[in-house]
Amino acid sequence: MRLWAYFYSPMIKSPTPFLRNYRVLKIPIVDANGISAWPAVFPLERIDQLRDTVGPRHFSAQMMLEYLPEDKARLDPGALKFYEEEFDAKNAKIGDIKITGATCYWDPSGGRKKADASVCVIVYRDDKNRRAFIHDIRYLLVDDNDLHPLATQCEKVLDFMAMHGQRTIGIEVNGIGSALPEILREVAKKRNQPAVVQKIINSARKEIRILDAVEPLLTTGRLFAHERVRATPLPSEMLGWTPQGAFGHDDGLDALAGALRLNPPPIRPLGQFFRPMNARTEFKV
């Protein structure tokens, strides 16, 4: 098939319209019979891996050439896989699952009632199987009469980090968060608690950040949550969320998306640092 066209220039009058009578050639990665279009490059096993990695919506648009509008996307809380085990730092496992990294993330606000929620979340990662575990999420509230609401929130965030053995945290510094890294460091110094702060600046629209970070994991069955997450507002946020915006709050989802987008610091079993050693005693003094 040959495609002839004249390139348009405002200084040159083309005898025919640009790409007039052109034809579109579309070759989806899998045909109607389930056969790969390029079996040598994309065997069916590889195609299944791609589908599991990017999720059905992205796979349909990018690999099957069938675009699904973003406004049709939803986040079904029923697709979450819940677990009860706690993280075992000695073996770096949750149950029998080997954990390779962890991310602690804070999406801050004023923390007042009837306002946007200030949310801190910890997510463990299993990079070998591309799975994520929402291990805990904390919605931070401060009293309306609190004269130092940001410092109070920093205390609660540091408590949250200490409870889960975390020393590094990402903080969204857009808006109110711009002053929080310094405040958190100062509070941590007074508590003699190690804390490394990573400043995060988000420029993409919030709904796109949530959709791109959460949907592929959720729709492919790779997003897990601890049982304690059931009692938080997060499942309700998922149920009421659309790419056009949430019917209610979506601050927990925003924090979760931030944690999923970060490159997690690696985790290694603590037990490997406590190996028994045998001293030689067969010597003369």
Image (cartoon, rainbow, N blue to C red):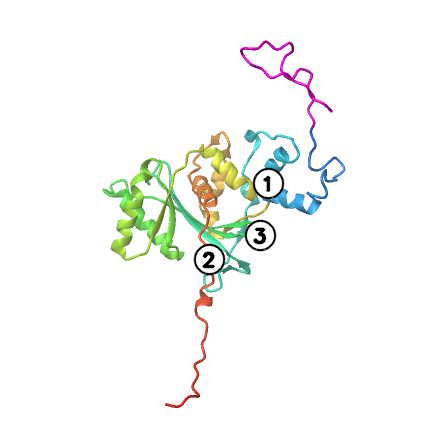
Tag of residue 139: none
Residue 9 percent across, percent down from the top left: 56, 14
> Quick check: 142 left or right of 273?
left
Tag of residue 267: 2
**Which class describes the residues within 10 Å of circle 1: few (<14), some (14-19), or many (20+)?**
some
Q: The C terminus appears in which quarter of the rendering?
A: bottom left
Tag of residue 129: 3
Q: Is residue 110 visible?
A: no
Question: Which element carries disc 3, helix, strand or loop?
Answer: loop
Disc count in the image?
A: 3
Query: Rounded to the nearest whole Å, what is the CA distance between mark 2 and mark 3?
Result: 15 Å
Kind of residue at badge 1:
Gly
* Residue ID for mark 1: 55
Q: The N terminus appears in which quarter of the rendering?
A: top right
Viewer-proximal residue among 65 and 206? 65
Kind of residue at badge 2:
Ile
Question: Which sits earlier in the primary sequence, circle 1 or circle 2?
Answer: 1
Viewer-proximal residue among 186 and 9? 9
Query: Rounded to the nearest whole Å, what is the CA distance between mark 1 and mark 3?
Result: 14 Å
Instruction: Determine contact: label 1, label 2, CB under 8 Å.
Output: no
Residue farthest toward the bottom in the current orientation of the protein: 284
Of circles 1 and 2, the one toward us is 2
